[in-house]
Amino acid sequence: MNPILECHGLTKKYGDFSALTDLNLTLGRGQIVALLGPNGSGKTTLIKLINGLLTPTQGEILISGQHPGAYTKSIVSYLPDHSYLRDKMKVDDIIKYFCDFYDNFISERAYEMLASLSINPKARLGTLSKGDKEKVQLILVMSRKAELYVLDEPIGGVDPAARDYILRTIIGNYDENATVLISTHLIADIENVLDRVLFLQNGRLIMNETVDDIRTANGKSVDVYFREVFRC
Ligand SMILES: Nc1ncnc2c1ncn2[C@@H]1O[C@H](COP(=O)(O)OP(=O)(O)OP(=O)(O)O)[C@@H](O)[C@H]1O
C-alpha cells in the first residue's frame, strides 16, 4: 500500500527564516504517530503544509501520493490548534453541517461520543466550558472515516480523566489502516497509545523511531528521553 504521507526535501520559509528545513519523511498506514518538539520547532508549520494551508518553499509533500488539494482534504481529518466553529451554533447543528459537508462523516459515532462525555447535543457551543468545546471539536474530527487524522494539541485543555477517555476514543474510532498524527506537549499522557515518534528541533527532523526502539535503545520512556534531548 502506498504511504499516507511523504515529504521530500520539504522546506518552509517565512521571509528569510526557515521554519522547516529539508525534511524527508515517509509514514506508512495504520499507526499512531506523535509529532514532538519544543515550542517553535515547526510542528504546526508541518501540519499546515499537510492540510494545504501553507505551500512549501522547496521540496514537496504528498498525501496518499497526491499534492494537498481537494482530494487530500477528503481523506484527511484535521483538528486545528484553535477553534473555527461559531459559538452561536448548537452542537447538533454543527453535526448536521459536517454531515452535509463530508461524505465520510458518521453522525451516529458523533452522538455516541457526545453521550459518553455527557455533552448535550442541544447546547450552543458558546455555553460549553473550554474543555467541553475541545472535546466537541475532537469528536467531529474523529467521526469522519478518514485515512489520515491530524490532531494539533488535541488534549491540551481537557482534564486528566477526560484525556484517558479521549485517547481511548482516538484509538477506538480510527480504522486500522488509517494513520493518526498527534502534535502534543503532553507526551506522558499519550505515550502508551503511540507506535512511532517524530522529533523536530529548529525545523529539522532529528528522530523518526518506533516507541519500542526508543525504549529498548535508551532504557527510558519517550517522555523522559524527550526531556533529556530538549533540556533547556
Ligand atoms: N506566519 C509566520 N510568520 C513568521 N514566522 C512564523 C510564522 N508562523 C510560524 N513562524 C515561526 O516559525 C517557527 C515554527 O513555528 P510553529 O508554529 O510551526 O512551531 P510549533 O513547533 O508548532 O510551536 P508550538 O509548540 O509553540 O506550537 C517559529 O519560530 C515561529 O515563530
Image (spheres, rainbow, N blue to C red):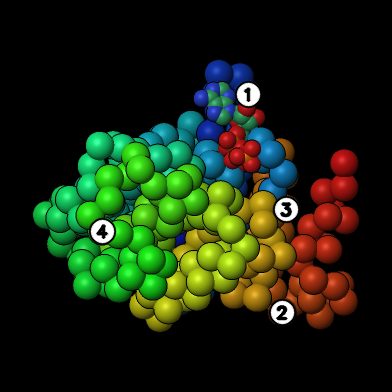
Measure the C-alpha gap from mark 4 to mark 1. 44 Å
Instruction: Kindly state the secondary structure of the residue where label 4 is placed.
Output: loop
The amino acid type found where label 2 is placed reads Asp
Judge from the rendering whether residue 92 lies leftward or rightward of residue 56; answer left or right. Answer: left
Rendering quadrant holding ligand 1: top right
Q: Residue at x 59, y 58 (%)?
A: 159
* Number of numbered tags placed on the structure image: 4
Residues at discs 2 and 1 in contact (Cβ within 8 Å)? no
Q: Nearer the viewer, residue 201 or 167?
A: 167
Q: Residue at x 87, y 47 (%)?
A: 231
The verdict on label 1 being within 8 Å of ligand 1 is yes
User: Residue 17, labelled with which disc?
Assistant: 1
Q: Earlier in the sequence, mark 3 or mark 1?
A: 1
Q: Earlier in the sequence, mark 4 or mark 2?
A: 4
Q: Residues within 10 Å of mark 2 (few under 14, many from 20)?
A: some
The amino acid type found where label 3 is placed reads Ile
Q: Nearer the viewer, residue 76 or 127?
A: 127
Residues at discs 3 and 1 in contact (Cβ within 8 Å)? no
Q: Residue at x 77, y 63 (%)?
A: 223
Label 3: which residue?
206
Q: Nearer the viewer, mark 2 or mark 1?
A: 2
Measure the C-alpha gap from mark 4 to mark 2. 40 Å
Q: Quadrant of residue 87?
A: top left
